[in-house]
């Protein structure tokens, strides 16, 4: 589909844990990028893309995407599962601080590097997507 809401919702669905299967982060990134091709400065999609990229340990692109979200909507709020909020700009700053540390001070193995890049560590608790996903439109 080439519908912004459908691509966004499908990206969210692929990125979230589902009882019937594993998450498909690669496809979620693809759907978010297709949605951003339609509306390049959509803050929710930019933030969700950045979170998935962090989970894939693509820190450089996640950082660039978060900086873009912070630029277009600096006060855009994210909410974690405990109801805590953080702005896109603050999350971008936290990731910047993480990236400024020497790698050997952050982690010593690929597994610990991946754990250090977990968005929940940057946000203090597990992040959830910044909006409630809407159901996909029914086919005609």
Image (cartoon, rainbow, N blue to C red):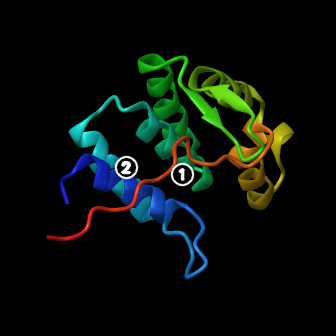
Vertical position of residue 101 compared to residue 71: above or below? below
Outermost residue, bottom side: 20
Residue at x-position 56% and y-position 82%: 20
**Number of the label disc, if any, that sits on residue 86:** none
Across and down, in percent, residue 140 comes to: 14, 70
| 86 sits to left or right of 62 | right
**Circle 2 sits in a helix, a strand or a loop, which is it?**
helix
| 1 sits to left or right of 78 | left
Residue at x-position 77% and y-position 32%: 102
Vertical position of residue 38 compared to residue 74: above or below? below
Across and down, in percent, residue 28 comes to: 43, 59
Residue at x-position 82% and y-position 41%: 106
| 14 sits to left or right of 119 | left
**Number of the label disc, if any, that sits on residue 32:** 2
Residue at x-position 40% and y-position 64%: 27
Query: What is the quadrant of residue 2 in the picture?
Result: bottom left
**Residue 40 in view of the camera:** yes
């Amino acid at each position: 589909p080439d519908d912004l809401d459908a691509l966004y919702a499908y990206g969210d669905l692929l990125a979230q844990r589902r009882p019937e299967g594993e998450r498909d982060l690669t496809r979620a990134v693809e759907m978010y990028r297709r949605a951003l091709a339609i509306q390049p400065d959509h803050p929710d999609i930019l933030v969700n893309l950045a979170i998935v990229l962090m989970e894939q340990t693509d820190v450089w692109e996640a950082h660039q995407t978060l900086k873009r979200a912070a630029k277009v909507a600096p006060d855009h709020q994210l909410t974690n599962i405990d109801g805590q909020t953080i702005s896109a700009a603050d999350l971008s700053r936290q990731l910047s601080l993480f990236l400024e540390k020497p790698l050997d001070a952050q982690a010593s193995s690929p597994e610990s590097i991946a754990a250090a890049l977990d968005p929940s560590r940057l946000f203090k608790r597990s992040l959830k997507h910044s909006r409630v996903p809407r159901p996909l439109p029914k086919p005609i």
